[in-house]
Image: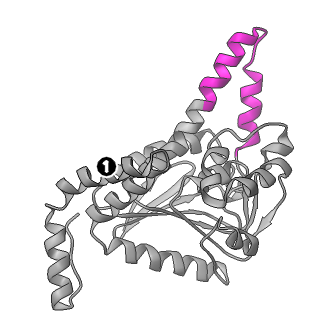
Amino acid sequence: MSTTPYQAFRVTLEDKIAHVAINRPDKVNAMNADFWREIIEIFQWIDDTDDVRVVLLTGEGKHFSSGIDLQLLAQAAAGLGDDVGRNADRLRRKILALQASFNAVDACRKPVIAAIQGYCLGGAIDLISACDMRYCSPDAQFSIKEIDMGMAADVGTLQRLPRIIGDGLMRELAYTGRMVDGEEAARIGLVNRVFDSHEALNEGVRALARQIAEKSPIAVRGTKEMIRYMRDHRVDDGLAHVATWNAAMLQSADLRVAMAAHMTKQKPDFAD
């Protein structure tokens, strides 16, 4: 196992699975300045490291994350001056910088699995919306809290969540800020499954990550690319894109390895 030091995260790599844990449990894993900077660095490292095939995203302690650190918002407000135009420009650049943090998660070539317990509030919804799959324990509580802070969510929830739970439900949750428990989260498709406990959640997502890590990394990355591409394109565009992609990728040795393993009923061993 290898470990990389960060201020707001604990990152480990074992068995081709990168475990990225938000590591501010004493602050309910609130997203401070270190968090927003480091998550870009971490996911760049994940993208650049062939030995990483899957990512597990978790939160240390009782809660996944309470969202953006309010001190960060206070600092942004304190930096405003008297000129409305300059204030707007400064705030817009700050918001775009925050968006880039979760864009890095969304754009990651490797599947990202979020395991959620306790609070998943505000900015944490933006974060899990950028992940490939979401799972939770029964005590999970989800809320788009920005509405209660007098603002619109601006780091990805309103753009990504409709594709996960549907437009109508997203509007209800965004307009009201009401809490969604684990059972409802599974029913509306916000999470794929509710596990019976924190322990079962951790074991379950690790088993899933191991299963994905055993697959051809070329095939997994191609599949994710096609799914992401189809969010913003027509069916005929997507078909043309996958045809061009596979014209190259089907020449990979992974195809021969997979076919040989299938015929001999043995477990395939793919290169990174």
Residue range highlighted in magenta: 68-95
Q: Of the residues shown, which amino acid type is indicated by label 1?
A: His
Q: What's the residue at 79%, 54% (across, down)? A: 173
Question: Principal SS element in the magenta part?
Answer: helix
Residue holding disc 1:
241
For this view, does 21 lie left or right of residue 265? right
Q: What's the residue at 39%, 45% (across, down)? A: 44
Give the SS element for disc 1: helix
Q: Quadrant of residue 94?
A: top right
- In reply to whether residue 144 is colored magenta, the answer given is no
At which x and y percent is residue 108? 42, 51
Circle 1 packing at 10 Å, graded few (<14), some (14-19), many (20+), is some
Q: Quadrant of residue 179?
A: bottom right
For this view, does 37 lie left or right of residue 221? right
Q: Nearer the viewer, residue 242 or 216?
A: 242
At which x and y percent is residue 22? 59, 56
Q: Quick one: quadrant of the C terminus?
A: bottom left
